[in-house]
Amino acid sequence: MSLTLVNARILLESGAIEKTELQIDGGEIRRIGTGAGRGKTLDLGGRLLLPGIIDLHGDGFERSLAPRAGTEFPIDIALMDADRAILASGITTALLAQGVSWEGRLRSGATAERILDAIERARHRFGADLRFHLRFEIFAMEEQERARKWIEDGRVAMMVFNDHLPQYEESLRNSPERMQRWSHIIGMSFDEFRAELKARRAREAEAEANVRAIAEVARRAGVPIGSHDDDTPELRERYNALGAEVAEFPVNMETARAARALGNPVGMGAPNVLRGGSASGNVAARDVIEDGLCDYLISDYYYPAQFHAAFKLVADGVLPLGDAWSLVSAGPARVGNMPDRGTIAPGKRADLIVVDDSEPGLPTPVAAFVAGKLCYAATDLGLGAVPGLTPA
């Protein structure tokens, strides 16, 4: 159906905000401007209309799967719960970042396959466009064939390589009690966990070959590839040589600068921006942004973070709204190879969010359209008068 949104302050592709009208038809933005459309109209009451947020890496859904350590809930129910949280956070496209590791349990290949199956099985029921982001632990040699098949079958929207072994080895030396807790969570005794770390480290050459093989498959399939938590320029250069061009969460400014010198896009955590620094002592995302090195922001472990981080950058005078919002919309659209979304322009998908910014310092997403369909509404906005559009 055709719907015209009127009395809206629209963030245009140019970065300007204009109070005007926008017509949605066939799931796309058809026209922008006064008198843009006829038929059904929806008065947004002067609220902001922004491109829907694109989250290329969010693992907040794990809280729906296992809200307490050792407690797991049915995946289909958990994903429906996560979908609601995602939409309420202004996210219209979400890549669910599922780890595949030698650690097992929630990060086992079998669990990842169940999650991937559930995403595909219930796609018609989700409001947001949910996709699968593969976080592959490089020492998970036994999972290589499974991962290769997912990629070849077109089931993976993006993938990044992880290597948590150095972090675990350091924690064993400096804070063994932390690793004791982690071993309990993944279902190993502490002795078993330490032995497994040692055994994995002994297979380093095999892990390197593993990475090369999977990266080649992903390159051929056209899947965006990156690496996670690079801590040296040399490591970033190594992954770049494999075609893993996206630098996710570079640990320090030197590595972020090395990524930019290579022409690699850099993604930083939105919680880092919102909290004013990294929870793990890494480089502050705001510093990376102010240095002009950040291409997009990631929800990471907290879905509301992208929305509020963008507005915080505006409130703090770091960026104008157009540039700040690009970090959660147009930027991730480019990196994730999604040219059909990310900006408000004719011909783009009508992935849009309505924002009430009337209360200073606390903007709120109050509605979300995904491919032109209203999928979330925190207030009626008069939508009851529009056939086929029912507030969530």
Image: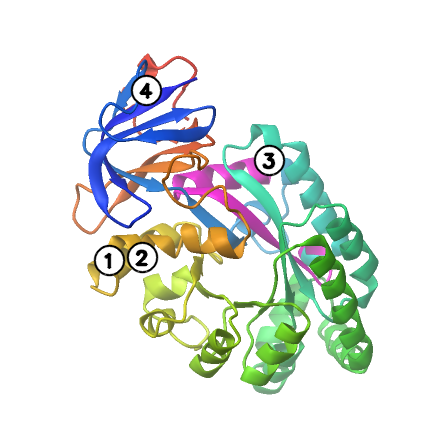
Stretch in magenta: 77-106
Whether 376 is drawn above or below 230: the answer is above
Q: In the rendered image, which quarter is residue 52 located in?
A: top left
Indicate the position of residue 374 as horizontal and vertical percent values.
41, 27
Q: Residue at x 49, y 54 (%)?
A: 334
Indicate the position of residue 93 as horizontal and vertical percent values.
50, 43
Count neighbours of disc 4 (C-alpha within 10 A) and say few if under 14, some if 14 to 19, many if 20 or more: some
Asked whether, in this view, residue 100 is left or right of residue 278, the answer is right
- Type of amino acid at the residue the image marks with label 1: Pro
Of residue 28 and residue 188, the one placed in the foreground of this image is 28
What separation in Å lies between label 1 and label 4 (alpha carbons)?
A: 31 Å
- Type of amino acid at the residue the image marks with label 2: Ala
Whether 129 is drawn above or below 144: the answer is above
Is residue 83 a member of the stretch shown in magenta? yes
Judging by the rendered image, the residue that carries numbered circle 4 is 383
Between discs 4 and 3, the one toward the N terminus: 3
Count neighbours of disc 3 (C-alpha within 10 A) and say few if under 14, some if 14 to 19, many if 20 or more: few
Judging by the rendered image, the residue that carries numbered circle 2 is 324
Asked whether, in this view, residue 108 is left or right of residue 68, the answer is right
Judging by the rendered image, the residue that carries numbered circle 3 is 77
Which numbered marker is on residue 320?
1
Nearest to viewer (mark 2 / mark 3) = 2
Q: Secondary structure at mark 2?
A: helix
Of residue 117 and residue 30, the one placed in the foreground of this image is 30
Nearest to viewer (mark 1 / mark 4) = 1
